[in-house]
């Protein structure tokens, strides 16, 4: 089955700085790679995703890159704001998703 | 439009009891997924429905867990003889039909927090 590793487990940045979260996956059959943001006590919210036929995707301050050969993908958040503080999960799969263990991002004002 | 809804929001039960958790997907979404999330961890896949049939139930931990989706819309996750280790947030997600530009995107419900005493 799929195995997803996510790093770092915690990340603290100053407001305005960039944040990068990295994930690796094991199953070359996986073709869908979403990222979710989860605030305390709330549901996971899809913030961006990428499919295996694309190498990079950007949506305003958020970007995701995918390296299929190396089986890793990354989330980049630029100009971080305090409201970006949350736990971020990467996931990989075709239908059923395997999630990483999460990164707690703290943006210091 | 309305998102994925789940009931109840909280369920407290005693070890050995039977529980049912309900999920109402986004209208028109043909795919429905159940995950569970333990404290401090990412969601863990349980089962996936395409229409009425279970397309992949490889994540169900044992035969105490069962799920149905008889009319291709609402789904019920059933847990028999609950154990303390079943305590978690059970999340449901739905996904649009093939051919939609958003196919594959999974939208989560608020979850049911199950506590087994």
Image: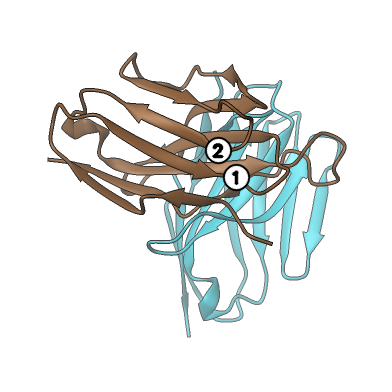
**B55 displayed left or right of A56:** left
Above-or-below relation of B59 to B3: above
Determine which quarter of the picture holds residue A101. Answer: top left
Above-or-below relation of B44 to A90: above
Which residue is label 2 attached to? B74
Q: Residue at x 65, y 49 (%)?
A: B26
Asked if both marks, 1 and 2, belong to the same chain, the answer given is yes
Residue A108 placement (x, y as % from top left): 45, 80
Q: Secondary structure at mark 1?
A: loop
Q: Residue at x 57, y 43 (%)?
A: B93
- Letter of the brown chain: B
Question: Can the viewer see residue A75 in this picture?
Answer: yes
- Letter of the cyan chain: A
Question: Can the viewer see residue B42 in this picture?
Answer: no
Which residue is label 1 attached to? B25
- Provide the chain ID for the residue under circle 2: B
Front residue of B85 and A81: B85
Residue A63 placement (x, y as % from top left): 74, 59
- Provide the chain ID for the residue under circle 1: B
Q: Secondary structure at mark 2?
A: loop
Q: Quadrant of the N terminus of chain A?
A: top right
Q: CA separation, marks 1 and 2?
A: 6 Å
């Amino acid at each position: 089955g799929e195995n997803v590793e996510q790093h770092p487990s915690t990340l603290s940045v100053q407001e305005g700085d960039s944040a990068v979260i990295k994930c690796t996956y094991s199953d070359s059959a996986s073709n869908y790679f979403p990222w979710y943001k989860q605030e305390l006590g709330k549901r996971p919210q899809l913030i961006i995703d990428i499919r295996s036929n694309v190498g990079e995707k950007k949506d305003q301050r958020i970007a995701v890159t995918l390296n299929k050969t190396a089986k890793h993908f990354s989330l980049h958040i630029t100009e971080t704001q305090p409201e970006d503080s949350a736990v971020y999960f990467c996931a990989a799969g075709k239908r059923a998703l395997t999630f990483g263990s999460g990164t707690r991002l703290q943006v210091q004002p | 439009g309305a998102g994925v809804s789940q009931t109840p929001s909280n369920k407290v039960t005693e070890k050995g009891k039977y529980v049912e958790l309900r999920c109402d997907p986004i209208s028109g979404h043909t795919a429905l997924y159940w995950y569970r999330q333990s404290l401090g961890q990412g969601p863990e896949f349980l089962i996936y429905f395409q229409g009425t049939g279970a397309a992949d139930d490889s994540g169900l931990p044992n035969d105490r867990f069962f799920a149905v989706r008889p009319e291709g819309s609402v789904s019920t996750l059933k847990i028999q003889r609950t154990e303390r280790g079943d305590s978690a947030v059970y999340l449901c997600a739905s996904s649009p039909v093939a051919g939609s530009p958003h196919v594959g995107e999974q939208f989560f419900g608020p979850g049911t927090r199950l506590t087994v005493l």
